Amino acid sequence: MRENPDIRIDYSAKFLKQLKKSSLSIKIAFRKRLALFIQDQFHPQLNHHSLIGNLKGYKSINITGDWRAIFSEYKELERKVVVFEMLGTHSELYK
C-alpha cells in the first residue's frame, strides 16, 4: 500500500477490536478500500460522506454493500490525520 505523505492514518481501540472480530472477507475488503482511500478519498466507490444526528462530526466510507467505516479527521501541523473510529454494518452503526 502506497503511503500518502499528506495524510496520517490512525485507528481507535474500538475500531481495531471491531476489525479483529470481523470476518476475513471484511478484513480484506477494508484493506482494499483503505488503499483506495489513501489514493483518492473521494473515489466514487467509497461514497465518502459526512454524517448527521448522533454521529455529526464524523464521516463514513463504504467497505462493502452493507459495511461502513466511520472516521474523524483533524489537522496536525500541515498534515491531515484520519482516525478510523468504528467499523460495522449499516444497521449496527446507525441505530
Image (cartoon, rainbow, N blue to C red):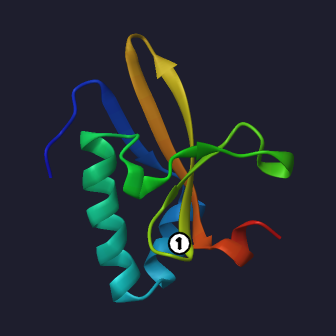
- Relative to 5, is 85 above or below? below
Q: Residue at x 59, y 44 (%)?
A: 49
Q: Residue at x 66, y 42 (%)?
A: 58
- Relative to 72, is 14 above or below? below
Q: Determine the residue located farthest toward the top in the rendered image.
A: 77
Q: Residue at x 79, y 45 (%)?
A: 52
Position of the C terminus by quadrant: bottom right
User: Could you tell me residue 18's position as x and y percent?
Assistant: 54, 73
- In this rendering, the count of numbered labels is 1
Q: Determine the residue located farthest toward the front in the rendered image.
A: 44
User: Could you tell me residue 67's position as x and y percent?
Assistant: 54, 73
User: Could you tell me residue 38's position as x and y percent?
Assistant: 28, 43
Q: Residue 76 occupies which quadrant of the picture? A: top left
Q: Is residue 14 left or right of residue 33?
A: right
Q: Is residue 87 left or right of residue 26?
A: right
Q: Residue 89 occupies which quadrant of the picture? A: bottom right
Q: Residues within 10 Å of mark 1 (few under 14, many from 20)?
A: few
Q: Residue at x 71, y 46 (%)?
A: 51
- Relative to 34, is 42 above or below? above
Q: Secondary structure at mark 1?
A: helix
Q: Nearer the viewer, residue 64 or 7?
A: 64
Q: Disc 1 residue type? A: Lys
- Relative to 20, is 46 above or below? above
Q: Nearer the viewer, residue 92 or 62?
A: 62
Pointer 1 residue: 17
User: Could you tell me residue 10's position as x and y percent?
Assistant: 42, 45
